Amino acid sequence: MSTEHYLKNELYGRAARDSAIFDLLQSACTDGIWYWDLEKPEHQWMSPRFWELLGYDPASRQHRTSEWQGLMQRDDLHMVLENFDQHCADPNRPFDQYVRYTHQDGSTVWLRCRGVAIRDAAGRPIRMLGTHTDVTALKQAEEDSQRLATQLAAANRELEAFSYSVSHDLRAPLRAVDGFSQMLVEDCAGQLDDDGRRMLGLIREGAQRMSRLIDDLLAFSRLGRQQIEPVAIDMHALAREVFDELAAREPGRELRLDLQPLPPARGTPAMLRQLWANLIGNALKFTKGRAVGEIGIAAREGEDGAQIYSVKDNGAGFDMRHAGRLFGMFQRLHSEEDFPGTGVGLALVQRIVQRHAGLVWAEAEVGRGATFFFMLPNPKS
Amino acid sequence: MSTQLEILLVEDNPADAELTMRALKKRHLANHLVHVTDGQAALDFIFGHGAHAGRDVHNQPKVVLLDLKLPKVDGIEVLRQLRAEKSTKLLPVVVLTSSREDRDVVETYQLGANSYIVKPVDFDNFSEAVSSLGMYWLLLNEPPLRKP
């Protein structure tokens, strides 16, 4: 007695008696169907869809095995026949593989060809029923993806070679400029007047500034090439560590840190460390003029569990009208004399935050300090 | 009795070579210094081949200052060959180079360099680095191989 749903039983029963049922199913099905007489292997019935997938008019084809064997690509045919032998010998070995056919228009069609042998009472395979599923689009996408991955790898290697060259070759002439300027000052002190010494000083400064620019550019480009391996990050500990490290480099200064509890984030540790270093470094830099440098680091929750971290300082601040230029490459809102810097730091911050699918922005008032905010998405999402 | 050779400077860039030697001279560390300008010459000198055939190869430098980017044979290959020979396996080699690229640093250490210094652009820093190097390797450090 069957435990199947009564409608299923009815459908199966009808299909056995009424060919219209199977006709409908077969024409609606996107797969091609084949039914093979293994006792007379030259004979095989192929559904109209079978031929349509290969670009042929079904009416023009005969129901013979030789009709399709010539259309399957050589290597695949070899594999298919081997699998067929194995399946016939052992029903537990599935007959299921991806094969390539040549379409009528000359293009390649990828088909998933699978089937099952029907055996007689003695277990001998006498018929085989199977289907062809067109997976060309899927395979094409796979190939495209592979090709792009290869191209990307090649592009990255080129960029690495370029950076390597920059790192090595641009610094050497700068060393010469700086070095020989200094030697000139040392060796020819007697023949140089104040102005001469001043000009040589400017030459040296130029060389050193260029060196810093090169370093920053390289750091920026290296960032773009890194893969993001997100892990859980203790932001509180990280911010504390970075602050301590940076503050230790300025032992003479009076600094006050107000570090609030910070929720953990998900991201790449090296990048987030760089992010804190740039923001805290800026806070330290722009509060140089204050008797006591006050830095406040805090966090609040945003929408959908996002976290908004902030770094606030009581430093020089900036004019909000120019805020749009803050994160541009080499953009500075203060002169080099007032506060040294290459103008890459915040561009790097923005790049890091963007790579973590976040946002960064700032609020400030001239002479009253600045607060930099960065939002990172919910670490659990 | 031949005077103990102290430094072999392998540097192809004439400006860098001049700056290095000047910095060493300032601290009186350049008295027994030999300067070669490519990797092949460095190997020929150390092993007494080619242009330096007949040199007393027992008189090895106390330290080799080796740039990585060299013509003919590059610094990495020079290091590799020095480390491959029993007689020079322990010879102190300080890589003094422009590159800060990670792969250079790692490969250099893996091949057995004793130290990796990036040449600073700022001359004061460069001068300081070179003279510290010189002081350390020539005066402070105990050499691995005693003179016979």
Image (spheres, coloured by chain):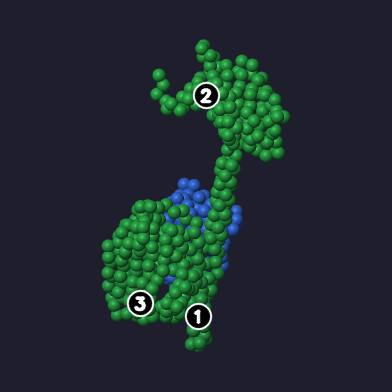
Residue A310 falls in which quadrant of the image?
bottom left
Question: What is the residue that sits farthest to the right in this orientation?
Answer: A60
Q: Which chain is mark 3 on?
A: A
Tell me the tag on residue A14: 2
Estimate the x, y position of residue A160 in percent, counting from the top left. 53, 57
Co-location on one chain, circles 2 and 1: yes
Mark in the foreground, 2 or 1: 2
Q: Nearer the viewer, residue A308 or B56?
A: A308
Mark in the foreground, 1 or 3: 3
Q: Residue at x 53, y 74 (%)?
A: A177
Q: Residue at x 66, y 20 (%)?
A: A42
- Nearest to N terminus: mark 2 or mark 1: 2
Tell me the tag on residue A202: 1
At label 3, the amino acid type is Gly
A263 sits to left or right of A208? left
Q: Which residue is mark 3?
A: A369
Q: Residue at x 54, y 19 (%)?
A: A118
Residue A113 in sight: no
- Nearest to N terminus: mark 2 or mark 3: 2
Q: CA distance from mark 2 to mark 3?
A: 83 Å
Residue A206 in sight: yes
Give the chain coloured green.
A
Give the chain coloured blue.
B
Instruction: Give the crowd class for mark 1: few <14, some 14-19, many >=20 residues within 10 Å.
Output: some
Q: Which chain is mark 2 on?
A: A
Question: What is the residue that sits farthest to the top in this orientation?
Answer: A122
Instruction: Give the crowd class for mark 2: few <14, some 14-19, many >=20 residues within 10 Å.
Output: some
Q: CA distance from mark 2 to mark 1?
A: 96 Å
Estimate the x, y position of residue B106 in percent, counting from the top left. 45, 53
Look at the numbered discs 1 and 3 and tell me whether their residues touch, using CB distance below 8 Å. no
Q: Which chain is mark 1 on?
A: A
